[in-house]
Amino acid sequence: MRQKIVAGNWKMNNDLAQTEDLLGQLKNQWQENEGVRVIVAPAFTNLHHAFESLRKTSIDVAAQNMNENSEGAFTGEVSARMLTSIGVKTVIIGHSERRAIFRETDEVLAKKVNAALENDMEVIFCCGEELNERMAERHFEVVKSQLGKGIFQVSEAHWKKVVIAYEPVWAIGTGETASPEQAQEMHAFIRKTIAEKFGETLADDVSILYGGSVKPGNAQEIFAKEDVDGGLIGGASLKAEDFLAIVNAF
């Protein structure tokens, strides 16, 4: 049975003091929920602190990105081995901002996925279409291509460490809104696409998260959809009360 997951992507927010404060609030307000796995992804500089702070809780820590190389002359980059050495065993790969701002290609993302899995890390693989692609009714085509080029090289055995996150980029900070029905439609398509490649049994076990501006007010309706297994949360994850309200929406 696939996991229900709520992951908070803090992006480039929170210095050490702010990270300590937010982690403290999460721990103080956190009530164990056996049905939902909770993950937070602070900035690189605060990953070790977050891991140590949350060690005695059931909240996991993820990195927001990593390099595809194991080591070398890649100034400013961080490898999978560096992350696992501080206890971080989950990484977000292919976030829409990495694709759009830093021009990460499907080919590069496939290498990152392979490097993470080779180091026994869990991957949260992001996919999703831009507004012009949605308007042109190419959204299914785009997502299928991203999956095919970025994650479908993974062996069936490795899929136990893969989570998919669907981000309708056009519904994030644009004023446009994706309906729960649109979220369900794409999640069902993603699961069907995985099933066509790897079989229905594997596809039914893969958690697919929704990453389109989930908030306390809409989380319950979105999470009620059959193929939505949780959320990859951006802005709302920076406020403990909002983030935990989303967790409790299940």
Image (cartoon, helix red, strand yellow):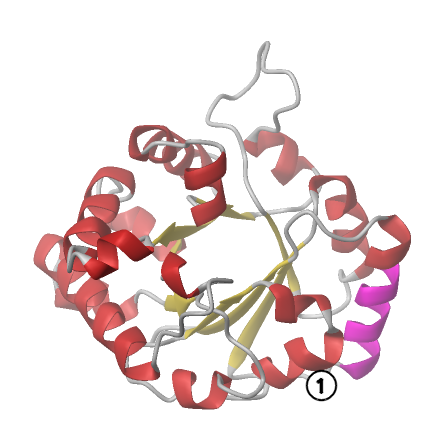
Is the residue 143 above or below the residue 116 in the image?
Answer: below
Residue 101 image point, x, y percent: 49, 37
Seen at 67% across and 83% down, the residue is 32
Q: Which residues are magenta?
A: 20-29
Residue 202, quarter of the rendered image: bottom left
| Viewer-side residue, 96 vs 53 | 96
| Label 1 secondary element | loop
Q: Is residue 128 left or right of residue 171?
A: left
Say whether residue 26 is magenta.
yes
State the quadrant of the N terminus: bottom left
Residue 192, quarter of the rendered image: bottom left
User: Disc 1 designates what residue?
Assistant: 31
Seen at 67% across and 80% down, the residue is 242
Q: Amino acid at mark 1?
A: Gln
| Viewer-side residue, 245 vs 128 | 128
Residue 13 image point, x, y percent: 73, 52
Residue 24 image point, x, y percent: 86, 69
Is the residue 193 above or below the residue 181 in the image?
Answer: above
Give the overall secondary structure of the magenta segment.
helix
- Residue 104 seen in the figure: yes
